[in-house]
Amino acid sequence: MMECNKLKRVDIIFCRKGFDLFEVVEKALSRDPDDLISDMIDSGLKGRGGAGFPTGLKWKLARNEEQDEKYVVCNADEGEPGTFKDREILDQVPEKVFGGMAICAYTIGAKKGYIYLRGEYNFLIPKLTEKLEIFNRSLKQIGLDFTIRLRSGSGAYICGEESALFESMEGKRGEPRNKPPYPTVQGYLGKPTVINNVETLVYAFMISRIGPEAFKEMGTKDSRGSKVFSISGDTPRPGIYELELGMTVEDFVNEFGDGDTKAVQVGGASGGCIPRKDFPNTIIGYEGIPTGGSMMLFNSSRSMYNVLHNYLEFFTEESCGQCTPCRVGCQQLLKGIESVKKGDRPPSYLRELVKLAKTMKIAAKCGLGQSVANPFVSIIKNYKEEIIH
Amino acid sequence: MSEYKVNLKINDIPVTVDAGTTVLEAAKKLDFKVPTLCYHTDLCIAGNCRVCVVEQVGAKTLIASCATPVSEGMEIRTNSKLVRQARKHIIELLLSEHNADCTKCYKNGKCELQDLASEYRIGDHAFLDLVGGRLGMVDELSPSIIKDDSKCIRCQRCVKTCAEIQGVSALTVAYKGDRQKISTFLDHPLVEVICTNCGQCVNRCPVGALVEKNYVDEVWDAINDPQKFVVVQTAPAVRVAIGEELGYEPGTRLTGNLVTALKRLGFSSVLDTDFTADLTIIEEGTELLTRLKKVLVEKDDSVKLPMTTSCSPGWIKFIEHFYPDFISHVSSCKSPQQMFGALAKTYYAQKKGIKPESMVVVSIMPCTAKKYEADRPEMRSSGFKDVDYVLTTRELGMMIKQAGVNFQNLDESPYDSIMGESTGAGVIFGVTGGVMEAALRTVYEIVTGREVPFNNLNVVPVRGMEGVREATLKIEGCQPEWDFLEGVELRTVVAHGLANARKVMQAVKEGKSEYHFIEIMACPGGCLGGGGQPIPTNPEIREKRAKAIYCEDENLPIRKSHENPEVQLVYEDFLGSPNSHLAHQLLHTHYTERERF
Amino acid sequence: MTDVKKIINRTIREYGKERQALMPMLQAIVQVKNHLDDGDMIAVAEALNLSAAEVFGTASFYTFLDTEPRGKYIIRVCKTISCHMAGKDEIIKVLEKHLRIKVGQTTRDNMFSLLTVNCLGWCHKGPVMLVNDDVYPELTPKSAIEIIESYISRK
Ligand SMILES: Cc1cc2nc3c(=O)[nH]c(=O)nc-3n(C[C@H](O)[C@H](O)[C@H](O)COP(=O)(O)O)c2cc1C
Ligand code: SF4
Ligand code: FES
């Protein structure tokens, strides 16, 4: 039996009481960068943007690159359907995000930082600009040569993918790059870059304050700490909640479900769909089902065909379009379930489509195309009848 | 190359390669072929078609072998079950968005996607047909190039070609997702944008989405019309490349066979563009000397130096769009093709007693831009369209096959006379640096009375495949009438590929380089790498064609344009002197400023 | 100087003439004009030494950098799953009826364009729409119309 926790609310991300922002930053800057990195590694913090790469290790890799020019980029492109926590974080506690960036800049030796904010959140720009000005000035005062600037997206989900984001910042189409090289080696403008999710940066900041031990105490072995969840769909309590990692979907549904939950989509459109029968034995975390925080609940009134159809439309439009498996694969999956629904193709065609989705998972160039199989296979597997009839 | 070595295994066979080598190259070293589509040796790596995926043992996903560098201890499988399934799926997906009407396709039999489909035995269409809406999205308005979006598989080779090799970026990728497509500015027709018609994109399109506009049927009709006298001219680079259309190795010289084949096809007379290449040297060389005199002696600032060559119509369109302020720097000489057309319907017609209106001039060119050039309104100085039809080397290959001419067994024949005689200097027009070399051979000799000071006339400094090559030639011991050139260091530069042309022009524009004479060829390698040449193209193939051209030069008895007896004759009998009034009327032209967009 | 020229110069001052200035430049133009026309893209291309095709290719990648003419107010209704479940279809229907246009169209007086978009990041408060940069969550058919009316009276 895997280790799991009970559902527990936590207040780290949004908490503002009991400390002074700049004191935390100043204290961090008085320490050896290597110590900061070992704290980060020790805390077990993994990226909260979806991919779950260990944050300390990422910083260390960038630190080890011998280059004058390095960058820290905050990924605020939050485009995953069902995710809205980064907006709230940037709205409520932007200084903590800036603080995380400053600490990262200090550890890796970067002088410039950028926040890539999705165009849909343009309304945040005036406030963020104002706060950034103050923050940048204060950084100068405490003697850190690091400036944060704002860059906007313009409506393209794929620009949340780190290398596509760099392309976009460079004034190009947001088409993901080949990897390797990874961002820590060649990121923005080909220079070593740490790119972290908004939430990751706040945790990094807070680990500097509360120490790795306090963070590590929460969660499970593979999923340390807590996480901010964006909860929507058929729930009486939609919204943003910070919860300890490692609970089961069952626990989660008991808290947030409407009593009639038939499935939970964990991790947004690109995540997996957990059917009711799997609620008790699915852990929310890297050992079970990882998530960037999106939790969408469906009750029994929902047609999973409509759900899947909606996701596939999303991917078909939002694929950058450069690679074959994703560009054409998404269209085939979408048209494919339509044709089965209409009876133009036999139900057995779904098997072909599942195989195709599996090819996309291993052959697409980036995470977008690779993850279409997650919802596709899990929904087809568990709700075949709803797809066919 | 890198000093670090990397050890890996491909299909269980160990191999050691330099660090930085891609998995694809390493596999090739072991003679494992991995199929590719978006990959092209001339271009930066895209890694987007995914046809080249292979399995890396222990990795979560397959990897694109073209885009992944080797790493120590890597174990690769190029033909595992997983790989085969994925590859087949990818090919099926490409076919599902491709208008696979193969039998009706211009590229039938020469299509990389078709080859893959047949290798992987793609039978019944496994997936749904997605071509639908793109059927009929064909741009046929350009006289040079046809763009058919329903055939496009979005490998982006054309876009990269246009940007990286040509620096033009007339083509782009537009939109995203299912709407993503290869487009011009706002999807305007190619004729209405900055496309130079160079056809380099055509050379690299793996399918039939970008092809030359074909005029083979029109030419057959002319040949079959008893009322018509059909003259054909062949460009220098065709003779070293036509073989590739007919099963020969790249770089096979086939001049004599080519002439015989053209006769068998039924052309009334088979003449040589090399003849007008020689003539170009006389006209252009004279123009250069005149400009030098006006600038250096008469201080006439209406006359511009450096002077650039004008024989590459892709380059002409490029400068008209991008450096309109420098149009006066371009030699006013028409290209050899157009000089030929103008003379054919005047001089040749008179000499042979043929009515110019019944004459049809066909040219066989390594070039798609020549099709556009022949259509320019300026190119009617004979009173008729000087060149009626321009065929690419590829189209000629098609005609030879259609006519059932067995090329291999043909005897060699010489070109007809007049306008069939040429020199080594004319032949090297087909390779980058060749016009410069030919010009130097003549100009130096006119000025000094002595041969150009290079062993065996080979002006080595202007040769090679480096993108931009500068060379300086000191002029010493001038004839009295040229003494203003005594001791002058003639500064020249040669560039091929328009991205390189842009570098040179930018340097000129910014006043960073003071050249006297600039040779520019729009295509990589010069005409031998032209947009109408056999496909595929790559540095090795171009190198072989170049070698063949230089070999052709060395084997000709006359190697200096001014010694071409037929060129001497045309001045005596018809034109008078170089740059004469009549010469200006027939052999020179003017250029048009164009929008930058 | 035209507005667009001014915007271009201002962006260059802030972001330089490198390609990194492209997105901010296009965004600034769209902020004012709601879309990019041929002339705008040509001017931008000229300013940044790009081809017009490259500018178009980049702009057309981004949903918000419209290369088609749009009205003064662009309404973008979220169509992704949570908003779908929360009733976005109904919102779209009343908007279509009220504005007498279909999704994708612009009203005759060039005031409103009605579009749908992918997830806007307000899934807990769907259905939601943007009118230019302003967000309107928790829409009901009634509130949607009131919002539109408030723009009409703003004129
Ligand atoms: C299609 C796609 C979209 C993504 N969108 C986002 C996003 O909106 N925000 C984000 O932080 N990470 C996103 N990512 C993940 C990033 O590529 C990257 O892993 C992340 O920003 C790293 O930060 P972290 O380590 O702090 O999670 C996306 C990845 C893919 C493949
Ligand atoms: S997987 Fe999709 S989004 Fe990613 S590179 Fe390929 S086409 Fe673009
Ligand atoms: S050849 Fe490697 S991805 Fe296309």
Image (cartoon, rainbow, N blue to C red):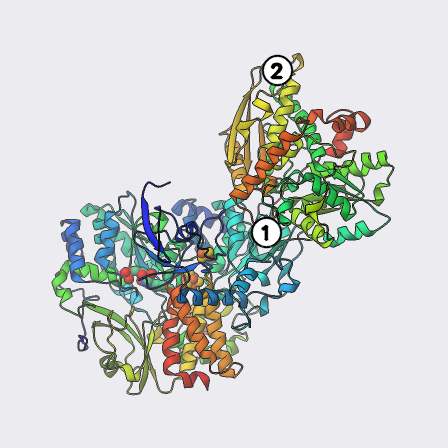
Helix, strand or loop at mark 1 = helix
Q: Nearer the viewer, mark 2 or mark 1?
A: 1
Percent coordinates x, y for residue C84 in the rendering: 41, 78
Which is nearer the N-term, disc 2 or disc 1? 1
**Observer-nearest of B540 and A197:** B540
* In the displayed structure image, the side of residue B563 where residue A16 appears, left or right: left
Q: Tell me the crowding category of disc 2: few under 14, some 14 to 19, or many 20 or more residues within 10 angstroms, Cα based.
A: some
**Observer-nearest of B523 and A284:** B523
Residue B484 shows which numbered tag? 2
Q: Quadrant of the N terminus of chain B?
A: top left
Inspect this view and state whether residue A274 appears: yes
Quadrant for ligand 3? Answer: bottom left
Residue B202 shows which numbered tag? 1
Q: Amino acid at mark 2?
A: Phe
**Observer-nearest of A381 and B575:** A381
**Relative vertical location of residue C27 with respect to residue B578 in this rendering, above or below:** below
Residue located 18% across and 75% down the image: A4
Percent coordinates x, y for residue B119 in the rendering: 52, 63
Helix, strand or loop at mark 2 = helix
Percent coordinates x, y for residue B200 in the rendering: 57, 47
**Relative vertical location of residue C94 with respect to residue B292 in this rendering, above or below:** below
> Marks 2/1: CA distance?
47 Å
Quadrant of the rendered image containing residue B110: bottom right
> How many numbered discs, if any?
2
**Chain holding disc 1:** B
